[in-house]
Image (cartoon, helix red, strand yellow):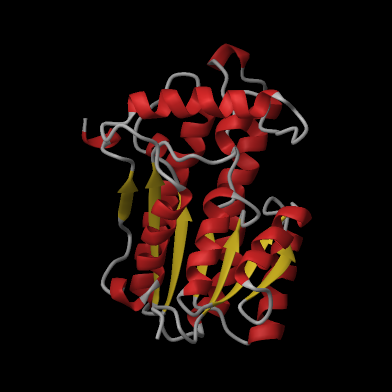
Amino acid sequence: MGRMAGKVALVTGAASGIGRACALVLAREGARVFAADVDDDGLAGTCALAGGEPAMAAIRLDVTSEAAWAEAVGEVERRAGVLHALVNNAGLCIAAPLLETTTEVWRRQQAVNLDGVFFGTRAALPLLAQAGGAAIVNVSSVAGLTGVPGLSAYCATKGGVRLFTKAVALECAAARIGVRVNSVHPGAIETPIWAKMQSDGRLDPGSNSVEDLMAGTREAAAHATPLGFPGAPEDIAEGVLYLCSDSARFVTGAELVIDGGVFAA
């Protein structure tokens, strides 16, 4: 029997990268997963990898919209009746020096990375509290623990996720509602976010330079990581699985750093 058998999970940013890996690992361990994203084609690919219903269902969700969150949580409740795990993973990274960071770039990252976590947590908390033991996992970053030149806006959002997580964890603990809240802090993980961060947070799938860009960032990540190689999305998903499962029943308000030793240096 899997570690998430009989449980229901909602994962955002599930069309690719860490979100896809989280959705697939949770489904592998027995959860009924609602995979959410704005990328319909990517979501279809994730669901196909999981074998489709009943293991996984796609939900179109713009995490920056309060109304969309209410709709998504309502759909989970209508179709499953309960929610045991929320993984707030959807994220956006745009690299730029501070003086070249426009207000629009600042606000786009705030909207996805921080507002999305706030909206999702607030919308899902009442349903999670009904589960009699539930978990929220917010995907932050090592950039939420320390500053990174050229990523000031991104660092601000991920640092916000870190402290938001702790505050909500203590609030839930004090209320005795049975909801644990933790954050995960990936280091250099080989996902599409690397190819997007230098191009205004967007990826042109038809671009011939994408693989070249990935190769360059892969080499840079390996050089910057004490273990000598970038992580894979599955490395993060296994940590998320632990925090969502009953194995972590005594863990709340914690930071799980999965970074190949970067933050230890």
Residue drawn 61% across the image and 37% down it: 109
Image check: 72 left or right of 167? right
Which is nearer the eye, 2 or 108?
Answer: 2
Which is nearer the eye, 47 or 253?
Answer: 47
Task: Tell me residue 154's x, y (percent).
Answer: 52, 33
Q: Residue furthest top?
A: 99
Which is nearer the eye, 229 or 69?
Answer: 229
Image check: 150 left or right of 73? left
Does residue 100 sit above or below 161 in this rendering?
above
Residue drawn 27% across the image and 35% down it: 227
Total number of numbered labels? Answer: 0
Q: Which quadrant: the N terminus?
A: bottom left
Task: Tell me residue 117's x, y (percent).
Answer: 56, 54
Task: Tell me residue 208's x, y (percent).
Answer: 72, 25
Which is nearer the eye, 42 or 75?
Answer: 42
Q: Residue furthest left?
A: 265
Residue drawn 63% across the image and 45% down it: 112
Task: Tell me residue 199's x, y (percent).
Answer: 67, 25
Image check: 177 left or right of 36? left
Whether residue 151 is visible to the viewer of this picture, yes or no, is no
Whether residue 117 is visible to the viewer of this picture, yes or no, is yes
Q: Which quadrant: the C terminus?
A: top left
Instruction: Give residue 197's quadrant in the image.
Output: top right
Image check: 22 left or right of 180? right
Residue drawn 71% across the image and 84% down it: 78
Does residue 132 sit above or below 240 in this rendering?
below
